[in-house]
Amino acid sequence: MRTRIAEIRETDTPEAKAAIAEAADILKRGGLVAFPTETVYGLGADAFREEACARIYEAKGRPSDNPLIVHIAETAALNRLTEAADPRVLRLAEAFWPGPLTVILKRSAEVPDRVTGGLDTVAVRFPSHPVARALILAAGGYIAAPSANRSGRPSPTKAAHVIEDLEGRVDMILDGGDTTVGLESTIVDLTETDARILRPGMIGGEEIARVLQTTEAAEAAPKVTAAKEQEAEIALAPGMKYTHYAPKGEMTVVSGDKEQVILYINRRAAGSDKIIGVIASDENAPFYRADVIISCGSRTDAAEIAQRLYAVLREMDARGAEEILCEDFTEADSTGAIANRLRKASGGRRVFVEADGTIR
Ligand code: AMP
Ligand code: MG
């Protein structure tokens, strides 16, 4: 298959409008289009065309029980996806949509099984990226999409990542430049009395709780719990049980005393005959001695670290890093989203170094 690639920087030029119309037409005919969102690039199909959604799994090599997120471009589009109107959804929509928040709702009968992985719930998001919004509207209002990477690879934050993984496997790729958020959306489950975070993202649980609580229903005090990682990721968001976001090199997250972390990483690098990569902060990068050193941003700037993380993981692959040692970035990570993705990328491998050099 030949993949059309179109660059779009502003949505209101005649060229951009033509490219979006062409992409919408592909979707309406059951094809696949990769498109930018503010979180990561998505691989879209018309959400109400079951056979088109099936092609997403084929193109990605995605396990068939891992459901897709339905992307909409107006809150009213929820009506066709879910029967039970939940006032919490409207509060969250008002506060965070368009934006990087996905809600899990009881599905309507019309939503294809291919989208939900056979679950009785559906994931819905209203993205803020202008190209995504224009495409969803032009394509009829409902695009089912997971991230536009080959299954198991880090999610794409640049069109080049999508091209690397999916050229020749999809009909069209819309290049909207680098994504700004960089990590996948927060997923919040609203199918039970207590809202539950199934996947942390840049919108945090506290913010969500605040919105759910500052309303007329305050006495009902809706709670937000972060589902326990094991429970959430394995049982609730089916996608989270698969190896995710992983670079090719074996990665270890190194936390603890700042100076001891640097000493530990330098010692590991000096003592190895493998190609060692270090994922550093701007503050510490000058102090490392290793084959490949890439900074992910300032230790105090979560937005910057999130925006760059997946590109850095892919860069480590491109530069042949066989072992990757990564700082932990917990100082800035108030929502836990960065720690969650580092845990995935490292398969949970971590080392803690105390101020006296003791390793735990
Ligand atoms: P991706 O955009 O590639 O991260 O894929 C969509 C994510 O949403 C996966 O982690 C899915 O497991 C999750 N997801 C989609 N639908 C549901 C659902 N009905 N319940 C829980 N998680 C879901
Ligand atoms: Mg994904």
Image (tube, grey):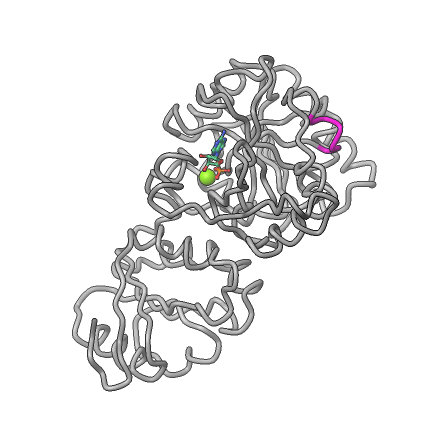
In percent of width and height, residue 4 lies at 60, 31
Residue 208 left/right relative to 279: right
Task: Report the magenta residues as a range.
Answer: 73-78
Give me the residue at 54% from left, 65% from top: 302
The answer to whether 15 is drawn above or below residue 353 in the figure is above
Residue 48 left/right relative to 268: right
Give me the residue at 63% from left, 50% from top: 177
In percent of width and height, residue 249 lies at 28, 55
Q: Nearer the viewer, residue 350 or 87?
A: 87
Give me the residue at 29% from left, 54% from top: 348
Residue 340 left/right relative to 91: left
User: Does the magenta stretch mainly form a helix, a strand or a loop?
Assistant: helix
Within the magenta stretch, is there residue 76? Answer: yes
Q: Nearer the viewer, residue 125 or 190?
A: 190
- Quadrant (top left/top right/bottom left/bottom right) for the C terminus: bottom left
Please identify the quarter of the rendering in which residue 281 is found.
bottom left
Within the magenta stretch, is there residue 62? Answer: no
The answer to whether 71 is drawn above or below residue 30 in the figure is below
The answer to whether 292 is drawn above or below residue 214 in the figure is below
In percent of width and height, residue 79 lies at 70, 23
